[in-house]
């Protein structure tokens, strides 16, 4: 196989930009695709070439696999990276890419098909000797069937979409009486999100931790585990804060998890990057699912292993052999906070608007994977994640304090975000000591407790006085500048145009 | 000018503000005098604030005439600042029960309407389900009341700010009709 020279990225937002950045470093040309809502987006502006897909709705744009393949062929791209979401875990798309004579930067379609089917993957894992959560082996198409299955497993149970992922179509059912309502809502959500309303059941484990193992393999049979990530700070089953490595897992258990993750991947002839998710309760772990794609929280693994996972995916897709050895040790500690346009005060309701008054953090050990810019419209068509804030520290406490500092430097105007909640969580005793599980955030919000915060006692009073001054004289005084606009010095603007404006004349 | 300040946590403060243009202020609060300085940095909402010798990077967003969102060091405060005249007018208005209109806070699709016209609802009761960004969100009543009209139906797309439902105050608290 030949190395990849020109890559089409079939995605948008921060992940499209993140993949482009690696391509740029590798000297690979990038092709962006976009919906009419994303004409101004950074992933379009930063690409070497860009092509319009269609109207804003995903079904008319980022899910148009046929159109994406056609564009790749016409512009002479030799490969497609799907990012995450949209077409990333669609085995028919993977097969169509191959049939068109293009390289798919990701795992083989067969592995994706098995792992994408929650029931088939459970069966494959049992056969491979990987521990799974007790539950049903047949899909339920209606509430009555689900109810019968639940009786056998014993309440409480988790109701999950057979075709699910990303926290959609999941409900906890604590007793038989709740089944009807829960099934209708969850199945409806699954039908809209995945086009498949069938559900299956798992025993609901009380207060588990969500620990996942990063795996990486090539087309030559090399397959390694690249450490684990702790992702238990979740709301509505969607992750908010992730870290690597996980706290307080005995070394031998950790090794067994790595081995189980590699076994899971090998059982489906996996290559490329993938994530094996486990629930961890009382020192035991159970296979939850395998995500056959690059994961949102992959940067924390990159930080502690000094590995660029996108680069590895591209090399492996081009046929190269993996040069990373098994048993690599993580260095220091990394934490990621997802910055979502949503209001934690209003049950995480998406918050739409125009981004303004934006101030991004910086400094030592800080990485911002973002596609946010001043004037950006946050629309209802896509996921609410705006950016990811990632820190690396020599130990967990330094990383935690660093992330607190980062969240205090950050400011996003125009929409509500999850940043304030993340800052609060980082200051709780439970987070500080690394004692938390997947139910932590819900319990924390329900109890309404406020941790001892690292802020001056009179900060609220100062905010009130600032408000009074602002009201007194709305105009206050403005610093006059020659470059009023986006606040960059003229030479920076020119340099940025040269650097990022696609093909340059030099 | 004297301001009555109230934060979202319920804290209250009265402050006398004297402005020395361009950017200097003298504040009198709880019998203390403070020197202050507030400079608009970028016309985007970033401010450089000083109170006595303490320095702050502030971000200010105007919500409406009285409400401001002030962010200091990652902590966000919603502050209501009313002057004396507004304070007097507000005290009068809040004694009257008010009708409530339920508006869409974002564009979305109505998935389900859980109430019908004439139905009594309690504060926090789910009224309808709105889907946006692939997530379903329950819209709940803020106050106790009676549904007067339902303006939307399931499957309907709504724009931000569109009225979806109207609530009247509960019958008992309605002012008696004049004879």
Image (cartoon, coloured by chain):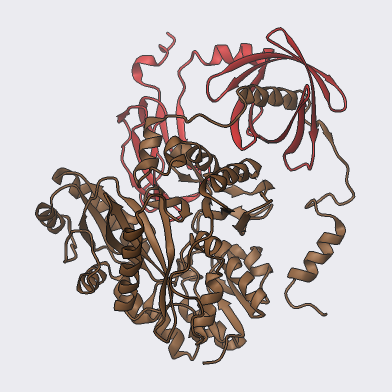
Chain colours: A brown, B red
Determine whether A480 is above or below A505 in the image: above
Where is the C terminus of chain B found, in terms of image quarters?
Answer: top left
Q: Depth check: give the residue in front, A503 or A225.
A: A225
Can I make out residue A196 in this image?
A: yes
Residue A430 appears left or right of A266: right
* Relative image position of residue A87 (x, y in whole percent): 44, 72
* Relative image position of residue A502 (x, y in whole percent): 72, 74
Q: Depth check: give the residue in front, A341 or B125.
A: A341
Q: Depth check: give the residue in front, A259 or A471.
A: A259
* Relative image position of residue A256 (x, y in whole percent): 31, 64
Determine whether A103 is above or below A159 in the image: below
- The residue lying at 69 percent from left, 26 percent from top is A467
Q: Depth check: give the residue in front, A268 or B90.
A: A268
Where is the N terminus of chain B found, in terms of image quarters?
Answer: top right
- Specify the quadrant of the image occupied by residue B118: top left
* Relative image position of residue A245 (x, y in whole percent): 45, 56
- The residue lying at 16 percent from left, 66 percent from top is A138
Total numbered badges shown on the rendered structure = 0
Can I make out residue A413 in this image?
A: no
- The residue lying at 37 percent from left, 45 percent from top is B129
């Amino acid at each position: 196989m030949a190395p990849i020279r020109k890559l089409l990225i079939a995605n948008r937002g921060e992940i499209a930009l993140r993949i482009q950045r690696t391509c740029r470093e590798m000297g690979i040309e990038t092709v962006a695709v976009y919906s009419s809502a994303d004409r101004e987006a950074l992933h379009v502006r930063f690409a070497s070439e860009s092509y319009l897909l269609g109207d804003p709705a995903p079904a008319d744009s980022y899910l148009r696999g046929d159109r994406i393949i056609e564009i790749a062929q016409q512009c002479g791209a030799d490969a497609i990276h799907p990012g995450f979401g949209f077409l990333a875990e669609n085995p028919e798309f993977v097969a169509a890419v191959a049939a068109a004579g293009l390289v798919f930067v990701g795992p083989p379609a067969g592995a994706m098909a098995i792992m994408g089917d929650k029931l088939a993957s459970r069966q494959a894992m049992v056969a491979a000797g990987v521990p799974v959560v007790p539950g049903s082996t047949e899909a339920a198409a209606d509430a009555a069937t689900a109810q019968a299955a639940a009786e056998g497993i014993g309440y409480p149970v988790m109701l999950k979409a057979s075709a699910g992922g990303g926290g959609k179509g999941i409900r906890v059912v604590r007793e038989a009486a709740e089944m009807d309502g829960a099934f209708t809502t969850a199945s409806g959500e699954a039908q809209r999100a995945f086009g498949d309303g069938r559900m299956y059941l798992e025993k609901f484990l009380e207060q588990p931790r969500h620990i996942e193992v990063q795996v990486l393999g090539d087309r030559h049979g090399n397959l390694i585990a690249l450490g684990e990530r702790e992702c238990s700070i979740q709301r509505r089953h969607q992750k908010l804060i992730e870290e690597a490595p996980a706290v307080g897992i005995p070394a031998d258990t950790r090794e067994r998890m790595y081995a189980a993750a590699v076994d899971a991947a090998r059982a489906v002839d996996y290559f490329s990057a993938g994530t094996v998710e486990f629930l961890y309760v009382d020192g035991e772990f159970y296979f939850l699912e395998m995500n056959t794609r690059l994961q949102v929280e992959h940067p924390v693994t990159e930080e502690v292993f000094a590995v660029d996972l996108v680069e590895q995916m591209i090399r492996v897709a081009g046929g190269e052999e993996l040069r990373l050895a098994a048993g690599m040790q993580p260095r220091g500690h990394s934490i990621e906070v997802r910055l979502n346009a949503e209001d934690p005060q209003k049950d995480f309701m998406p918050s739409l608007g125009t981004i303004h008054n934006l101030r991004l953090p910086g400094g030592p050990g800080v990485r911002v994977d973002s596609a946010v810019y001043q004037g950006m419209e946050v629309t209802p068509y896509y996921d609410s994640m705006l950016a990811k804030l990632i820190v690396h520290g020599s130990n967990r406490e330094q990383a935690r304090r660093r992330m607190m500092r980062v969240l205090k430097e950050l400011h996003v105007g125009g929409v509500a975000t999850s940043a304030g909640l993340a800052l609060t969580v980082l200051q709780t005793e439970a987070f500080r000591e690394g004692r938390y599980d997947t139910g932590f955030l819900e319990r924390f919000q329900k109890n309404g407790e406020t941790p001892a915060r690292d802020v001056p006692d009179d900060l609220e009073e100062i905010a009130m006085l600032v408000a009074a001054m602002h009201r007194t004289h709305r105009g206050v005084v403005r610093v006059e500048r020659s470059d009023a606009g986006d606040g960059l010095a003229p030479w920076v603007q020119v340099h940025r145009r040269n650097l990022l404006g696609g093909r340059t004349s030099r | 000018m004297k301001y009555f300040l109230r934060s979202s946590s319920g804290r209250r403060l009265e402050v006398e503000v004297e402005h020395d243009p361009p950017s200097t202020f003298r504040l009198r609060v709880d019998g203390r005098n403070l020197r202050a300085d507030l400079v608009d940095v970028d016309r985007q909402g970033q401010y450089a604030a000083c109170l006595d010798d303490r320095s702050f990077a502030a971000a200010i967003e105007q919500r409406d005439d009285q409400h401001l969102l002030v962010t200091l060091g990652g902590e966000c405060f919603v502050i209501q600042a009313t002057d004396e005249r507004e304070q007097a007018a507000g005290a009068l208005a809040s004694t009257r029960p008010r009708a409530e209109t339920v508006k869409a806070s974002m564009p979305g699709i109505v998935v389900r309407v859980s109430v019908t016209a004439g139905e009594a609802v309690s504060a926090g009761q789910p009224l309808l389900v709105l889907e946006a960004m692939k997530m379903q969100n329950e819209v709940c009543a803020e106050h106790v009341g009676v549904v007067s009209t339902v303006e939307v139906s399931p499957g309907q797309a709504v724009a931000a700010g569109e009225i979806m439902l109207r609530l009247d105050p509960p019958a008992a608290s309605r002012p008696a009709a004049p004879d």
